[in-house]
């Protein structure tokens, strides 16, 4: 089967940073699905893993997490899907990735593809939808108001993949006032179109930008990017007893200044359930089915932004470069095999 991977961590400008491969078709385990991959999207985690992982000598590392495809076969203990089912999922960071024609995945973290979406639109959804959903509803518990705080959430990085889904979820499924950040006209427009009530400029001090809205101090802050750069401003702008969540990887994170406000701090990492085979691992498959239902009902829309062509090393290198530039909006998708 065709696949794309790397043998050594290299800068993305290097032609060998990602290479085309020919590998054996994998064999599904007892709870696995064997999926024929039709489309994938690229996330910041792809670039982080490529930069940090050193594959075993002579063994390629296959990246890729988001995927949409057709179930080809099921494992001996799998019962949730049948061959021929259209599925979408966000992968498992401890296993070989989705940048391959065939891919094995635990059925408990797989959802049925939204019927109303194209392959590209569906491929853009899983990882960011799970991340945003878990951050808002499992970590921040946004349906439980912070006493005395402005009933509002600030989403830092509103035009990114996770921010784009979080904006929709907060706007459509809660009564929060949704404040996002963006700094370019196109990303401001994108964020507003997804439902943000207010968009502020993250190139300016966030506390002053939020104060100018005259809403009061928000009870919730969800930071998807540049947390270390904005942390001091978040400490200032968040309400006492507020809740703060983040998903990025700052070199250091001093949360001591939150103590005087009793602000709770929450990490969200959507691979935790699959990584540790948690007791609620099946919750991710159920979550994806609910996202598909909301999409098909018109409540949520895909954050697919741009197609980079077929799944190949050259096209994936271009996608990684754009992600690393920090100027991507929405999701980059690759579809089909040359």
Image (spheres, grey):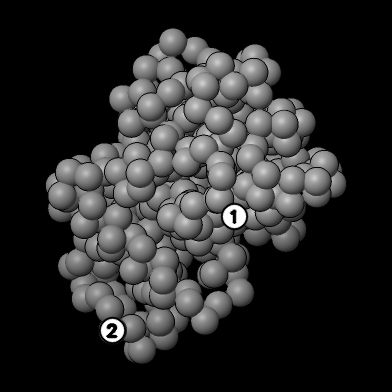
Q: Nearer the viewer, residue 294 or 43?
A: 294
What residue do we see at 84% from left, 46% from top? 256
**Lateral position of residue 26 relative to residue 5, left or right:** left
Image quadrant containing the N terminus: bottom left
Tell whether 310 sits left or right of 92.
left
* Residue for badge 1: 268
Residue 65 in sight here? no
Residue name at image x 55 percent, y 77 percent: 278
Taking 51 as reference, is 107 left or right? left
Of the numbered discs 2 and 1, the one sitting upstream in the chain is 2
The residue that appears at 59% across and 56% down in the rendered structure is 269
- Residue 73: image location, x then y, percent: 28, 75
Percent position of residue 87, x then y: 27, 61
Which residue corresponds to the image point at 21% horizontal and 57% vertical from the top-left? 293
Q: In terms of image quadrants, where is residue 103?
A: bottom left
Q: Position of residue 252 (x, y in %)?
A: 83, 42
Residue under numbered circle 2: 79
How packed is label 2: few (under 14 Cα within 10 Å), some, or many (20 or more)? few
Q: Between residues 322 and 244, which one lies in front from this camera angle?
A: 244
Residue 228 pos. (x, y %): 75, 34
Q: Helix, strand, or loop for circle 2?
A: loop
> 94 or 186: which is nearer to us?
186
- Eye-nearest disc, 2 or 1: 1
Q: Name the quarter where the C terminus is drawn.
A: top left
- The crowding category of the residue bearing disc 1, from other C-alpha atoms within 10 Å (few below 14, some 14 to 19, many at least 20), is many
- Report the residue that reaches farthest toward the front: 148
For residue 298, say whether it is visible: yes
Residue 250, above or below 62: above
SS state under label 1 = loop
Q: Is residue 216 above or below residue 262?
A: above
Q: Kindly report the distance in space between the C-alpha atoms of the residues bearing marks 2 and 1.
A: 29 Å
């Amino acid at each position: 089967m065709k696949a794309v991977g790397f043998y050594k961590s290299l800068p993305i400008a290097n032609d060998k940073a990602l290479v085309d491969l020919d590998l054996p078709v994998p064999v599904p385990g007892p709870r696995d699905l064997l999926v024929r991959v039709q489309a994938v999207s690229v996330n910041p985690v792809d670039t982080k893993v490529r930069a940090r992982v050193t594959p075993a000598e002579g063994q390629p590392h296959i990246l890729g997490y988001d995927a949409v495809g057709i179930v080809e076969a099921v494992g001996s203990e799998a019962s949730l899907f049948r061959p021929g089912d259209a599925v979408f999922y966000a992968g498992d960071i401890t296993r070989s990735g989705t940048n391959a024609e065939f891919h094995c995945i635990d059925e408990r973290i797989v959802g049925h593809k939204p019927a109303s979406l194209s392959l590209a639109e569906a491929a853009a959804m899983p990882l960011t939808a799970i991340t945003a959903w878990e951050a808002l509803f499992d970590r921040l518990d946004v349906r439980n108001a912070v006493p005395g705080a402005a009933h509002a959430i600030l989403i830092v990085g509103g035009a990114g993949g996770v921010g784009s889904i979080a904006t929709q979820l907060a706007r459509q499924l809660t009564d929060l006032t949704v404040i996002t950040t963006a700094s370019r006209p196109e990303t401001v427009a994108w964020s507003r179109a997804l439902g943000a009530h207010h968009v502020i400029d993250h190139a300016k001090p966030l506390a002053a930008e939020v104060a100018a809205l005259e809403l009061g101090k928000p009870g919730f802050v969800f930071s998807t990017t540049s947390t270390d750069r904005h942390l001091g401003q978040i400490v200032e702008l968040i309400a006492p007893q507020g809740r703060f969540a983040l998903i990025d990887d700052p070199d250091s994170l001093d949360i001591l200044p939150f103590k005087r406000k009793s602000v709770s701090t929450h990490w969200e990492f959507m691979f935790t359930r699959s990584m540790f085979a948690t007791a609620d691992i099946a919750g991710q498959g159920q979550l994806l089915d609910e996202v598909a239902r909301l999409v098909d009902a018109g409540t949520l829309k895909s954050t697919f932004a741009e197609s980079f062509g077929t799944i190949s090393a050259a096209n994936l290198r271009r996608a990684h470069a754009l992600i690393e530039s920090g100027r991507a909006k929405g999701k980059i998708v690759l579809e089909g095999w040359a």
